[in-house]
Image (tube, rainbow, N blue to C red):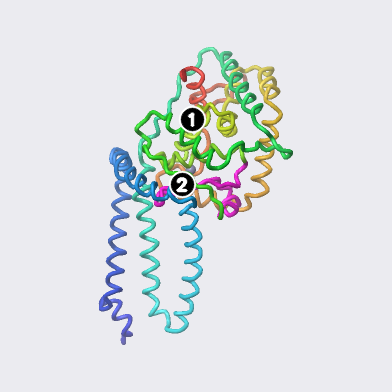
Amino acid sequence: MEINKSWKDFILFKDKSLFRKVVVLLSLLIILLILLLLRNYRDFCDGYSKTVVQFYELVFGHIASFFPFSFFELFVIGTIVYAISWIFFFILKTKRTGIKKSYHMILRLLVIVMSIITLYQATAGIEYSRYPVDIPQHHELLENHQDYKEIYMSFVDDFNYCASKLTFNEEGSVVKPYSNEELIKYLELEYEKLDSDYFYKYSPKAKPMYFTGWFYRAMSISGVSFAPTAEPNYNILNPDAYQPFTIAHEMAHSKGAMPEEDANLVAAYICLNSEDPYIRYSGYDVCFWSLESFVMATNNKQNVEEFYNSIDDNIYRNNNYEYDYWTNHATFEKIADWVNDLYLKFNNDVGTISYNDNIDTTQTETEFIINSYSRYQALFMWLYFDKN
Ligand SMILES: [Zn+2]
């Protein structure tokens, strides 16, 4: 059988540049496989994150923070442009010289894709397998279930207080009282209150997603933390009440808390622990409804009615606004959820379910019981009993 010359070159590595590409590709593959194997060792992942990734974030975080725009957004736009032009030139070249001459193009693309995947795995990928975050929580269950009333009512009062300090627009949405820069600065200050070496010392500057916000909103994505550029990015098209929580969540990723449940718990702590009514409101906006279990646990219908009646009307208006907002804009939510679920599972996570609070209750015919506190509930208990 006659083998064409270019195929011979391919098989025998006569082409030096081809040989180089294959060596680079194989090396990347080996590094990636080692990194995937190392994910099974928690102590290693924790130590590696605190040293290597922390140093990486420190260097690239400083560089990225120096610029007012998001490198991640540039990366996304660049990727789309590159993908389109690659397909265009691939078809052109293949038409002209046939498929056998196109393997250089395919290999070059594979090297680029593998470099990004390997870099991502060497930063964020390893962080997924760290120990859980050490946010203060209170896990001891109450013996007298009637005591829950005083606890949840203190948070209803505080949520109402925060609402009373804010302005709501005609549509019912909270109006952000700060500029983007001010809000980012305040959240950085909130992070300074965190007393734990779990988190990296340096906080890279959070970046508003000015150009791709509409694209992410269509997928119901409120923010993206991108480890290779050490940038916490947040969608400026999020409803205002949701902004501080999102920024705090993305900053948590950039400071070493990678699993979603961890980033959410850190963001809840950062927001609910704040003295600022707007930032605290954002914490309640996400976590408040976990307190419903406390209300139910009193097993008193009157308490339930009283609870819902005592919540400020503006809070309900803002909730409805947010619900309608996402319903009207998040057209591709299901596809994005599916992709994110796959991504999280690939990274040793349980999937998108990890965004939810882990409520653990039982409803019998006669009684509602809390089996153990969820993350947010244990945080509320800490705020109530132990904060001061
Ligand atoms: Zn996240």
Q: Quadrant of the N terminus?
A: bottom left
Mark 2 nearby-residue class (10 Å; few <14, some 14–19, many ≥20): many
Residue 353 vs residue 383, the one in the foreground: 383
Residue 153 drawn at (x, y percent)? 61, 19
Q: How many marks on residues?
A: 2
Identify the residue shown where x is 49% and y is 39%.
249
Q: Is 57 one of the magenta-colored residues?
A: no
Determine which quarter of the picture holds residue 136. Answer: top left
Tell me how far mark 2 sits from mark 1, CA to CA: 19 Å
Looking at the image, residue 171 sits to the left or right of residue 100; the answer is right
For disc 2, the marked residue is: 225
Identify the residue shown where x is 50% and y is 27%.
273
* Three-letter amino acid code of the residue under disc 1: Tyr
For ligand 1, tell me if the residue under mark 1 lies within 8 Å.
no
For disc 1, the marked residue is: 269
10 to 52, vertically: above or below: below
Q: Is 231 one of the magenta-colored residues?
A: yes
Residue 86 drawn at (x, y percent)? 46, 71
Provide the secondary structure element on which disc 1 rests: helix
Residue 89 drawn at (x, y percent)? 47, 75
Mark 1 nearby-residue class (10 Å; few <14, some 14–19, many ≥20): many
Provide the secondary structure element on which disc 2 rests: strand
Residue 386 drawn at (x, y percent)? 46, 18
Per the rendering, the mark at residue 139 is none
388 to 173, vertically: above or below: above
For ligand 1, tell me if the residue under mark 2 lies within 8 Å.
yes
Looking at the image, residue 124 sits to the left or right of residue 51; the answer is right
Residue 165 vs residue 9, the one in the foreground: 165
* Three-letter amino acid code of the residue under disc 2: Ser
Range of residues picked out in magenta: 212-239
Looking at the image, residue 51 sits to the left or right of residue 263; the answer is left
